[in-house]
């Protein structure tokens, strides 16, 4: 058995200062230790996939990151592991617990996952080893992980057995910004009968408002990223591929790691609905350097325009309730200008803009690989793994 301090401090020596997690009782000592230490950074994510994407965003901002989760949460992490972390080649350290391990008496819901935890990581091409249970094993295990991550630009995992870490009490117990926050609200209604703006026109407006230096634009998967690329392929653009819904958590991680940057997340209604829990995480942790724009055409545009349920969802109300400092909504493109102009104190901005469905003719796909897009953006912001 080890002490939480022994592992966390050894990891700190190797540059790991950012921790994202969804709690598990096996992880309680680690999470408590990290929360207690104000010099470490902790994000309590709504689900394991968001925890992974937030850690990935922090990693591209230059913060070595650790993701902690119960093994049952590997199910929530499969998509970002395979279509974000693997595709973009992002190294980070994973700790997953081994609930339901063979021979361990546990709750019935852990039985199957306990049998296949290692196999799941193997299938996803994530190398792993058993979490060190002795103090002398900690540094060599971490060094093995770091060598692999640096050489392969891929994640590395530890599987933690029950009773590996001694208890560690929590002092205080709050995370994020628990203080009440008033939200600046505004509605922008197109009163001139022009109809909803096209995505292409909105993206052009966003580009005009974002200089190449000091800003990063993260575009959700599908037509949004492809149209952004078609308008202007700039080094400060990151085009998400797959990992639907993870643009917001990915952008949160980057914004936390790099408060000197203005991080703009360009989301879609289908993607936002898929991972709406991240609204609460952004509202609790993000600062004024994050702007979250939701372009809502009420359909899954790139898959044949099947309807979403966004017509029944007041996204700006949700953002305000989750702690965003400004939450604008409407169908007038001038919302974008006002959103960028507004000054907030202590929190992020959110804009819910209704747009029309459809895209431009002969819409191209990015002709640069996702990994190359990411390295180019990291070079632009002066970051490295």
Image: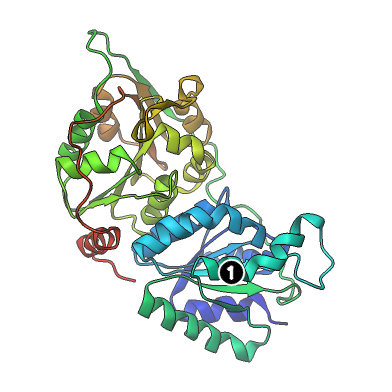
**Residue 304: quadrant of the picture:** top left
Q: In front here: 376 or 302? A: 302
Q: Residue 32 sits in which quadrant?
A: bottom right
Q: Is residue 323 found left or right of 353 in the rendered image?
A: right
Which residue corresponds to mark 1? 95
Q: Quadrant of the N terminus?
A: bottom right
Position of residue 31 relative to residue 246, above or below, is below
**Residue ID at (26%, 13%):** 195
Q: Nearer the viewer, residue 360 or 315?
A: 360
Q: Position of residue 161 (x, y in %)?
A: 71, 74
> With 9 as the anchor, is 382 left or right in this view?
left
In the current view of this chain or complex, which residue is farthest to the right? 105
Q: Residue at x 18, y 38 (%)?
A: 209
Q: Position of residue 76 (x, y in %)?
A: 57, 52
- At a point 36% along the width and 25% down the height, the residue shown is 297
Q: Quadrant of the C terminus?
A: bottom left
Q: Is residue 304 left or right of residue 1?
A: left
Q: Residues within 10 Å of mark 1 (few under 14, many from 20)?
A: many
Question: How does the figure colour the protein chain or chains?
Answer: rainbow
Query: In this rendering, would 34 be left or right of 193?
Result: right
Residue 22 appears anywhere in the view: no
Q: Is residue 109 visible?
A: yes
**Residue found at x 70% / y 76%:** 165
Q: Position of residue 273 (x, y in %)?
A: 49, 35
Q: How many marks?
A: 1
Residue 141 at x, y = what percent?
Answer: 55, 85
> Considering only vertical position in the picture, is 21 above or below 252?
below
User: Tag 1, which secondary structure?
Assistant: strand
Q: Is residue 284 above or below residue 85?
A: above
């Amino acid at each position: 058995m080890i002490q939480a301090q022994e592992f966390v401090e050894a990891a700190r020596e190797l540059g790991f200062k950012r921790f994202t997690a969804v709690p598990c009782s096996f992880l309680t000592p680690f999470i408590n230790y990290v929360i207690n230490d104000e010099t470490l950074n902790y994000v309590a994510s709504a689900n394991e996939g968001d925890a992974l994407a937030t850690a990935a965003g922090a990693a591209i901002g230059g913060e070595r990151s650790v993701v902690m989760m119960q093994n049952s949460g590997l199910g929530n992490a499969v998509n970002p592991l395979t279509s974000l972390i693997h595709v973009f080649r992002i190294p980070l350290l994973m700790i997953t617990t081994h609930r339901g391990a063979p021979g361990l008496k546990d709750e019935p819901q852990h039985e199957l996952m306990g049998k296949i935890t290692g196999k799941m990581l193997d299938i996803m091409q994530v190398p792993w080893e058993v979490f060190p249970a002795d103090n002398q094993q900690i540094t060599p295990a971490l060094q093995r992980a770091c060598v692999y991550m640096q050489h392969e630009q891929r994640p590395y995992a530890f599987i933690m057995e029950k009773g590996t870490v001694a208890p560690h009490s929590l002092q205080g117990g709050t995370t994020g910004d628990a203080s009440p926050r008033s939200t600046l609200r505004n509605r922008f209604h197109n009163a001139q009968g022009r109809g909803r703006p096209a995505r292409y026109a909105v993206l052009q407006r966003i580009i005009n408002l974002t200089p190449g230096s000091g800003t990063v634009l993260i575009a959700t998967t599908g037509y949004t990223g492809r149209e952004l690329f078609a308008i202007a392929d700039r080094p400060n653009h990151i085009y998400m591929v797959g990992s639907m819904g993870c643009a917001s958590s990915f952008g949160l991680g980057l914004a936390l790691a790099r408060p000197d940057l203005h991080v703009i997340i360009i989301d879609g209604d289908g993607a936002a609905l898929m991972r709406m829990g991240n609204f609460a995480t952004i509202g609790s942790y993000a600062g004024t350097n994050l702007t979250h724009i939701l372009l809502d055409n009420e359909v899954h545009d790139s898959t044949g325009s099947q309807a979403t349920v966004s017509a029944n969802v007041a996204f700006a109300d949700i953002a305000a309730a989750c702690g965003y400092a400004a939450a604008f909504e409407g169908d007038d493109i001038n919302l974008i200008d006002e959103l960028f102009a507004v000054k907030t104190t202590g929190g992020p901005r959110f804009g819910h803009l209704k747009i029309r469905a459809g895209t431009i003719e002969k819409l191209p796909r990015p002709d640069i690989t996702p990994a190359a897009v990411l390295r180019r953006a990291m070079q632009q912001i002066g970051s490295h793994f």
